Amino acid sequence: MGLSKLSDELSKIPIKITVVDKGEARGYLNRLTAPLTVETILQMLPINSRTSPAMGHVSVLLGIKRGTEKPVDKVKAGTIAYWPRSDALTIYSKDMKPYSPVNKIGEIEENLELFNRLRSGSRIIIDRV
């Protein structure tokens, strides 16, 4: 096994995101992009919450009150980020420029379409695979 493959296995933690009665998506959290934020979120798993959809993204309030950590001001479709201003985990369903900088913490790899047209208050469960 190559060094980069080993590094990927250690830094990328597989997750599944279930929207109750709608379906399931898979992705990963990446310790390298925002280590403190990702570690805090990993300790919270499983997260059982409600969605707050907006144009181009879906947010889940976390209550961890973290600041920016390697912030970015543009995201691609499939990005999972922590949005410090709203104290929320945010999944972006399209390329966009967030309202304020976010900490990129992972990526959706399967079934990104799940996050289009969600209703506010849909039950969501985020857990390790």
Image: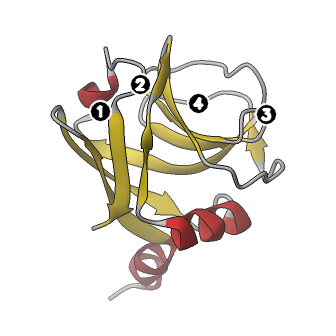
Q: In which quarter of the image is the N terminus?
A: bottom left
**Residue found at the far right of this picture:** 67
Asked whether 6 or 34 is in front, the reply is: 34
Of label 3 and label 1, which has the lower sequence position? 3
Circle 4: residue type: Val
Label 4 close to label 3 by CB (< 8 Å): no
Circle 1: residue type: Leu
Viewer-side label of 4, 1: 1
**Residue found at the far bottom of this picture:** 1
The residue that appears at 44% across and 72% down in the rendered structure is: 8
Residue 82 at x, y percent in the picture: 64, 44
Of label 4 and label 3, which has the lower sequence position? 4
Q: Is residue 40 above or below residue 24?
A: below
Asked whether 9 or 25 is in front, the reply is: 25
Q: Is residue 127 above or below residue 109?
A: below
Query: Which quarter of the picture shows residue 21?
Result: top left
Residue 97 at x, y percent in the picture: 66, 19
Q: Mark 2 points at which residue?
A: 93
Circle 3: residue type: Arg
Instruction: Measure the C-alpha gap from mark 4 to mark 1.
Output: 14 Å
Residue 80 at x, y percent in the picture: 51, 43
Viewer-side label of 4, 3: 3
Q: Residue 85 carries which label?
A: 3
Q: Residues within 10 Å of mark 2 (few under 14, many from 20)?
A: many
Of label 4 and label 1, which has the lower sequence position? 4
